[in-house]
Structure formats: C-alpha cells, structure tokens
C-alpha cells in the first residue's frame, strides 16, 4: 500500500510543485489550502504523514498542529515555515510537530526528512486493528483504549508508546531504542522521559502498577511488553 501524505499549504505554486514531486515518488497525496480544511481532513481520514505550513488562512499551523494532537492523532507532522526564529521551531516541536523545514528548502532534504519520519512512524494496523489482553482492548486504528469496557484516556505520546510495545511484544527494548523510535530523539539525557511515560501507562493499564504484569522492567536493559 502506497503511503498517504496530507499536504496543508496555501501557496499554490509550492502546493503543485510538492504534490507533483511526492506523487512521482509513489506517494498518494491529498491537499488542503487552509488550516481549517487541513484539520478536518487530518481528523476525518487516516494518513501516514502531514506536511503542515505555519502561515495559513482560517487557522494557522500552530493551532492545526495543537488541535490534531489534542484529538489524539499520532500521525507524524512535518512543519514548513518561512520564519527563521528559533522560538517558532521550539514552539512547533513542543506542541507536537515531529520535524520542521525552513523555506526556502532543498527538495532533496525535504524528501529525506519525509522518508525518515515515515520510517519511524508506527505502521498501519492490519485486519481490524484490534488487540486485546486481559481486560484491556486497544483499537489501533481508532486510537482508543478500553479497560473493562470503559475508555482509558491516553495522551498521543502514551498511545504511540503503547502501540510500539504492542508491535514489539516479547522483545526487550532499551530506553535508547524506545526514545529513538517513539520520540525520534538520540540524546541519552532524555531517557528519563521514557520512564515517566511507562509509569503513566502502568498506572492506567496495570492491575497493580507497583507489580506490573504487562510492561516489565528488564534490569539494566530496558522494558518488555509481556501481554
């Protein structure tokens, strides 16, 4: 199945150029010319990657990104910005963007960033996208989790981490690997964030978070999903 990219960009020339290039690379491309339409399409139809301009009519890129994450979607987001200020890039990453490219950009660099994001994005679930263990039911396609039939509220990052554990169940995963594959980070100084998110998942999913039976700690190595 060809990967699908949603391109949210209001500059007509760039929209056409990017669409043509992405389609020539084998991607399926859907376009939106304003932030409001972009948000509606992002939340209505599953896609593998979102390319999002910051300066958009009706709803700016920051708001679109923030609301996509608030909706629980974990689709990778690549921001396009004509701005050079570091603060804009930092804000974008903090509210949920996975990467950014500053205009004018080199097309080869953009394609490399796209390929990198798609490589580390969770794969689309097969069949009905359902996974069950004990009293827990996970709808990978609908990004929903239920415990004893009741919804379990997870942040977008918590859901992405849970999905990563499910896709790698039975495998001992180092904190560094989890950080790289789920967060896209490589710096060891951030590994504490993995522990924090694991602790949060345990609180929400384990019968006894102090004696976990699902997300196990492998001393000196990392974690293993044992469901």
Image (cartoon, helix red, strand yellow):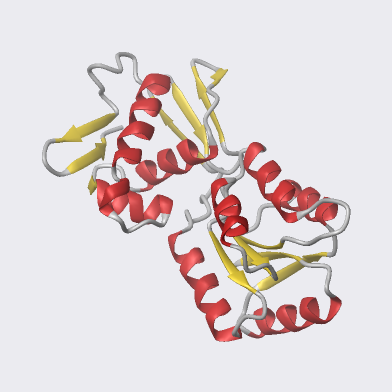
**Which of 31 and 14 lies nearest the eye of the viewer?**
14
Residue drawn at (50%, 64%), measured in percent from left and top? 117
The location of residue 12, given as percent across then percent down, is 85, 76
Q: Is residue 222 above or below residue 87?
A: above
Q: Can I make out residue 79 in this image?
A: yes
Residue positioned most to the left: 220
Residue drawn at (87%, 58%), measured in percent from left and top? 57
Q: Is residue 126 above or below residue 101?
A: above
- Position of the N terminus by quadrant: bottom right
- Position of the C terminus by quadrant: top left
Residue positioned most to the right: 58
The location of residue 122, given as percent across then percent down, is 47, 53
Left or right position of 122 against 92: left
The location of residue 203, given as percent across then percent down, is 38, 20
Q: Is residue 111 above or below residue 170?
A: below
**Which of 132 and 45 lies nearest the eye of the viewer?**
45
Left or right position of 206 against 149: left
**Which of 180 and 173 lies nearest the eye of the viewer?**
180
The location of residue 107, given as percent across then percent down, is 61, 84
Question: Could you say which quadrant of the image residue 56 lies in?
Answer: bottom right
């Amino acid at each position: 199945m060809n990967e699908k990219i949603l391109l949210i960009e209001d500059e007509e020339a760039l929209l056409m150029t990017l669409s043509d290039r992405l389609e020539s690379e084998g991607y399926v491309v859907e376009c939106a010319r304003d932030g409001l339409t972009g948000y509606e399409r992002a939340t209505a139809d599953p896609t593998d990657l979102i390319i999002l301009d910051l300066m958009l009519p009706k709803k700016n890129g920051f708001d679109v990104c923030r609301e996509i994450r608030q909706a629980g979607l974990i689709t990778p987001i690549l921001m396009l910005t004509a701005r050079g200020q570091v603060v804009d890039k930092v804000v974008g990453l903090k509210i949920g963007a996975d990467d950014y490219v500053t205009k004018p950009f080199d097309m080869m660099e953009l394609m490399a960033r796209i390929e990198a994001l798609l490589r580390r994005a969770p794969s689309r679930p097969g069949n009905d996208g359902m996974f069950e263990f004990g009293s827990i039911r996970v709808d990978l396609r609908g990004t929903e989790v239920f415990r004893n039939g009741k919804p379990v509220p997870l942040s977008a990052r918590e859901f992405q981490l849970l999905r990563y554990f499910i896709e790698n169940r039975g495998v001992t995963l180092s904190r560094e690997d989890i950080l790289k594959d789920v967060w896209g980070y490589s710096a060891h100084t951030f590994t504490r964030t993995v522990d924090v998110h694991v602790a949060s998942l345990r609180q929400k999913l384990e019968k006894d978070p102090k004696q976990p039976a699902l997300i196990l700690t492998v001393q000196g190595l990392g974690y293993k999903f044992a469901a």
